[in-house]
Amino acid sequence: MDLPPSSYHDSLEELWDEEEEPEEIETVMKVVPPVYHQYLDVFSKVKAEKLPPHHTCDHHIEMVGSLPPVGVIYYLSNQVSDTLRAYISENVEKAFIRPQSSSTGATVLFVQKKYGSLYEIIVFSKSEEENFTHVSTVLSRLRANNLFAKASKCLFHLSSVGYLGYIFSSEGLKMEQAKVQKILNWPPPRSLKALQQFLGFANFFPHFIKNYSKKISSLTSYLKKDSHFPLNEKSLRQFNQLKEAFTTAPVLPHFNPSLPTILETDASYYALGAVLNQVSDSGKHPIPLDSCKLLPEALNHDICDKELLGRVGSLKCWRAFLLSLSSSFEVLTNPSSLQYLISSKILTHHQAC
């Protein structure tokens, strides 16, 4: 894609700081597609390490009370002390900080983290032309607000991208294979903590598994404090079946408000399940799946009330999707419970609410 001549700077050199290393400039120009070279200054390492200009409203901290709090003094290891000295020297040199004399102070608190930055900016577009417009807008706003991007961490013009354990593509949403493999390699939990770790990991992807709450019902019973490990035969079988379900999890297509939509709900003794399907030329596909375990107070409801609870819950869950549809949608559910509800002359408290 070519930009109109007026969109280019007269010279790319004016985008760089005079202190910029030639190797850094060459690296950035290789990573950033030529179509965005008018925004090369957004990737300047030297400019990113300078203080931003003063704004109309600069940040400040208002103190509450006459005396500032005095922090507790902690001993620092040699490694941490060396890191602190290097940090202070580097930021004094950049003029990010300056020496001061104060009657109070606090020890620096160290927290291990990879890096501190705005992460990530994902630009999703329906076409290449639209993507150029979107990316240009993002880069322009970064420049206008004196914010910078690290070229080595940028990827452009991808058909799919991994983010937070998911793969986003034109086909839809699916789990990263590394996450699926980790679940498959998970050994049977032999303690409460091990079970909590497994369920905590698996609970990140419940919308890929149909009737997920039902599939983990036996496992969640072991979360009680008086439970004894290892898992019994039924729970171990459910554990293995759940791992197998992740290998056959579908790709969830992107929601399309113009497609025919079908909401399917179901209820069992101890759980509710729902699927929001859309019908395209290739057939019926689930968009998201949802399920939940019934609370103790709902276990004693009759099946009609449970079915109704499932319908209402799914309508609330996907309200934004359903209101976005350009036409009406279908609801598929147990017809017998619905007929009873329609023919009943007196509604119970649960049905009325």
Image (cartoon, helix red, strand yellow):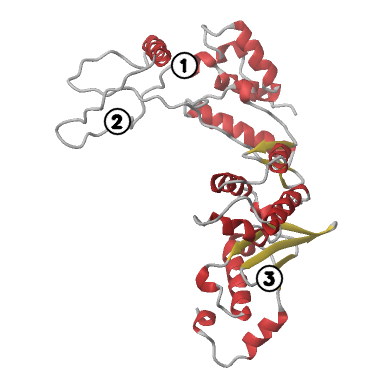
Q: Position of residue 12 (x, y in %)?
A: 62, 14
Going by the numbered disc 3, the residue's amino acid type is Asp
Going by the numbered disc 1, the residue's amino acid type is Glu
**Residue 138 located left or right of residue 257:** left
Taking depth in this image into account, of 270 and 282 the one nearest to the observer is: 270
What mark, if any, has residue 60 been given in the picture? 2
Residue 78 seen: yes
Taking depth in this image into account, of 170 and 294 the one nearest to the observer is: 294
Alpha carbon separation for disc pair 3 and 2? 54 Å
Residue 255 seen: no
Vertical arrangement, residue 170 with respect to residue 14, above or below:
below
What mark, if any, has residue 266 been given in the picture? 3
Q: Earlier in the sequence, mark 3 or mark 2?
A: 2
Vertical arrangement, residue 151 with respect to residue 287, above or below:
above
Q: What residue is at 57 percent from the left and 93 percent from the top? A: 345
Going by the numbered disc 2, the residue's amino acid type is His
**Residue denoted by label 1:** 49
Disc number lying in front (3 or 2): 3
Determine crowd level at label 1: few under 14, some 14-19, many 20+ residues with C-alpha closer than 10 A: few
